[in-house]
DNA sequence: CGGCTATGTCTCATTGAGTGAGATGAACTC
DNA sequence: GAGTTCATCTCACTCAATGAGACATAGCCG
């Protein structure tokens, strides 16, 4: 693996370098990265590398692995990440509700938010029935267009903004997920008409099915989306209505709670 | 609130500044931080601040709030944080097991790891019976000595290392939690003798009680700890034995799984 | 125990990258 | 449309990050 061609270009180079180091470390998963990984994939001298490693360790962004010469992501990232996932306080509000839904219905429930041209998973609660999903866990990202939650998020953006996002993602959606823009548009229309989304079916994960509903603020702007996924065989008409109603109730309660909180400042 | 006296001192100043910005932002919770917050709490010029904000945004560490002039933590931190919490792959292994325990017994279950002189919460699963806890969520940190999990982690460190940690934390433990070192030592002895910890009772949270067991690697080094908390009234002798056995079984299974994974590299 | 390899640190000269002051432009508020 | 605050630009300066290569230290294996 040669040099990485990050688009994350400009800005103080120190930040870019730091980020590159973190990315290389993250790519190593729970094994982290070794000095050689850094030296191969990045392009600065050994002393500089060590200066960064030291600095990042002091900031809590890295820690050294039990194995000498390897580095892992530090726990400060965990702390900040937990905060980051709580945009608008949504996550705290959603967590117990996702759990309740998962326990009650046995399916898996998700909280998503928009992150540029992607949807990012803020929280998952798995139920008793195992499912496959595009996102493995908190922090997973999908290009907007993939998955039920994407539709729910896209549907309530301005038409122009939505167009930009979709044309940006079009190629990737087709190549990696076998999803066509037209099908997305159709599903968005369904969302707007019926108030929930079912997701566009690509070539991947054909055995799973799901639902999603948006979480809208008072002005109709999407704060996020709640979604669920389940084996297709579980998606009977009555189960679908049950789950949908459950989700709608929880989201309505969340939004009320959120409005309450906003006035406390 | 004037200048902050961070101990996070040396290293490339750019990193320190970046971290300060992130910390200020984090302190703002889900409301984030405003330009003035940064300018007041930190000590660099406005153009420099904006350069940082721009850079951090491009790296995904920050995003701008819907409210103009305010900034929130970016979702890249969420992604990295999710990775960071998965040290040794423990979190992925623990997540479904914590959920199973929470559903079966109704109490709240936690995964902790050591982070220097602190214990950091990697994962929580709440059960049907609500509890209070020192940590609110993933990413929460406690000085080692507070809580059951701390004891389980401390007990299997070398005596010298343990001593350093405790003397470092002593003052804070007494002042903020009303916990004496001697009591911690006694509880560590209990852990070593009986294989589980109950935690030292300080003046805080007197109505709650809990249990913890260590997660040890093959050489007896602590990788983490699993703990639970519940209302004191729920802690009957039989419930305690049930939960303890459940936790021990899950941890044993986790450790087996982990060893299996290690040989796959 | 004693060489071997790879990790981590140091020194120093060099230069370029980040810096502040202040002016200017853009966006939102009333 | 006046006023305010957010955000960017320009430019000269200088300090702080950099690379080369030597040096120190820790674990490894016979």
Image (tube, coloured by chain):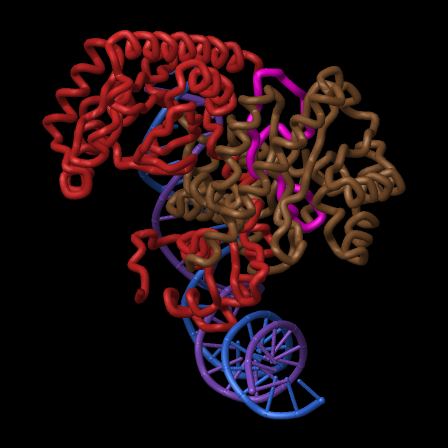
Chain colours: A red, B brown, C blue, D purple
Residue B92: horizontal and vertical position, in percent?
48, 41
Residue A92: horizontal and vertical position, in percent?
52, 23
- A84 in relation to A5, above or below: above
- B71 in relation to A227, above or below: below
- B142 in relation to B202, above or below: below
Residue A221 occupies quadrant: top left
Q: Which residues are magenta?
A: B112-137
In the image, A56 versus B4, the foreground residue is A56
Residue visible at 44% across and 14% down? A104
**Total label count?**
0
Q: Is residue B174 left or right of residue A231?
A: right
Residue B205 occupies quadrant: top right
Residue visible at 52% across and 41% down? B91
- B210 in relation to A212, above or below: below
In the image, A125 versus A166, the foreground residue is A125
Residue B189: horizontal and vertical position, in percent?
83, 44
Q: Is residue C12 left or right of residue A242?
A: right
Q: Is residue A20 visible?
A: no
The quadrant in which the C terminus of chain A is found is: top right
Q: Is residue B213 visible?
A: yes
Residue visible at 57% across and 31% down? B124
Q: Is residue D27 left or right of residue A188?
A: right
Residue visible at 60% across and 21% down? B105
The quadrant in which the N terminus of chain A is found is: bottom left
Residue B125, magenta (yes or no)? yes
The furthest residue to the left: A182
């Amino acid at each position: 693996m040669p040099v990485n061609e990050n688009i994350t270009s400009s800005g103080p180079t120190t930040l870019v370098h730091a980020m590159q180091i973190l990315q290389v470390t993250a790519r190593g998963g729970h094994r982290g990265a070794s000095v050689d990984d850094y030296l191969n994939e990045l392009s600065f001298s050994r002393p500089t590398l060590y200066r960064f490693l030291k600095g990042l360790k002091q900031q809590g962004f890295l820690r050294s692995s039990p194995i000498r010469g390897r580095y892992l992501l530090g726990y400060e990232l965990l702390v900040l990440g937990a905060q980051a996932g709580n945009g608008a306080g949504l996550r705290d509000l959603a967590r117990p509700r996702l759990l309740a839904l998962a326990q009650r219905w046995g399916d898996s429930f998700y909280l998503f938010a928009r992150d540029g041209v992607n949807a990012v998973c803020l929280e998952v609660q798995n139920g008793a029935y195992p499912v496959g999903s595009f996102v493995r866990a908190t922090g997973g990202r999908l290009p907007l267009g993939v998955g039920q939650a994407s539709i729910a998020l896209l549907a309530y953006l301005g038409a122009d903004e939505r167009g930009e996002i979709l044309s940006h993602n079009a190629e990737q959606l087709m190549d990696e997920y076998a999803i066509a823009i037209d099908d997305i548009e159709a599903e968005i229309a369904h969302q707007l008409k019926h108030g929930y989304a079912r997701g566009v079916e690509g070539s991947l994960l054909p055995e799973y099915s799901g639902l999603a509903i948006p979480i809208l603020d008072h002005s109709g702007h999407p704060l996020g989306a709640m979604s669920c996924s389940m084996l297709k065989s579980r998606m009977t008409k009555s189960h679908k209505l049950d789950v949908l109603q459950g989700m709608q109730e929880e989201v309505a309660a969340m939004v009320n709670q959120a409005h309450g909180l906003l006035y406390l400042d």
